[in-house]
Amino acid sequence: MKYFSIFLGFSLVFLLSCKQFSTVDSDDIVLEYGENILSLDDVFNSMPKGLSEADSLKWSNDFSNQWLRNQIIIAKAEKNLPKSQLNIDIEVLQYKSDLLKYKYENYYLRNKINTQVSTNEIDAFYKENKSALISTKTLVKATYVAVSNSIKDRYKVKQWLVSKREKDQEKLKVYAFKNAKVFDDFEEEWIELNSLKLLSHSKLLKENKSILNKVIEQKNDNITHYILVKEMIQVGQIMPLEYAKDEIVKIIVNRRKNKLLEEFSLKIDQELKHQLNKK
């Protein structure tokens, strides 16, 4: 039923609108332009899997529209281009070769690559390549609390933020849960200082260590923002391991890809040498 409805929609949208240059001789033909035919199989074989009926019809609509447009352009090119530019067999062969080469290389990588990177590998890479892991952004570990100005005891937030006592930290969390519009310690992970600026609308956050371990308080019309920056990595310093992990994983996996591609190229060269020696 799905295919039938698609084909029915197809017929209405394209066969009727393109009547001046398309004739339908069988149920399998969707569009015909000159000697070229777009069949129902062509459409279904090209269609991405998992589309809904509505999306399938839209995709079929667009696909056929593009097919017909291409046919018109090709016909005009064959009619108007100089003969010297019509002999494109070698170019087509090269394009096909490049496309298949690209597809096969990606297929080879997908089936060979190991994208799992262990903690030991990450740690070893970090120790050996610290000089290459320079931060281009100011990074901080921070806690941010935003409280409505209508809450009278909001001053306590400032006291609890700087306190090292576990009890005070628990009080802060309970208080924030009940009263704060925002409470975020970013799971104790490194974040960009600029993102903290945007989140808190603060103009007082500076790119230097003068802000460390001091509660920055900024009062706006309706909200008071409290920010405590506990640690900082400035631009030009080595990234902390926790922050660099994702970058390290990308580098390690990319190196594996390059190694596999080298192995792939070597195998092809060996096959080439074997074929040449057979002559």
Image: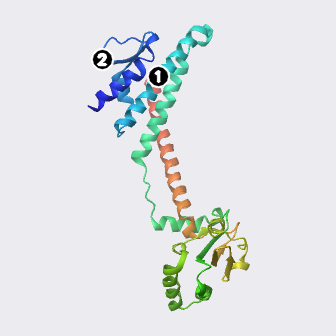
Decide: is 259 above or below 35. below
User: In this rendering, which labeled residue sits more in front, label 1 or label 2?
Assistant: 2
Q: Position of residue 134 (x, y in %)?
A: 66, 64
Across and down, in percent, residue 189 comes to 55, 72
Count of numbered circles on the image: 2
4, above or below 106, in the image? above
Q: Amino acid at mark 2?
A: Asp
CB under 8 Å between callouts 1 and 2?
A: no
Residue at image x 45%, y 36%?
103
Residue at point 49%, 52% (across, down): 256
**Location of mark 2 (residue):** 27
Closer to the camera, 224 or 96? 224
Q: In the image as oriented, which residue stretches furthest toward the left?
A: 1
Q: Is residue 64 left or right of residue 243?
A: left
Quadrant housing the N terminus: top left
Where residue 33 appears, x then y in whole percent? 45, 13
Q: Residue furthest front?
A: 150
User: In x, y percent, where is residue 114?
Assistant: 42, 53
Residue at which label 1 appears: 67
Element type where label 2 sits in the image: loop
157 or 73, nearer to the observer: 157
Residue 148 placement: quadrant = bottom right
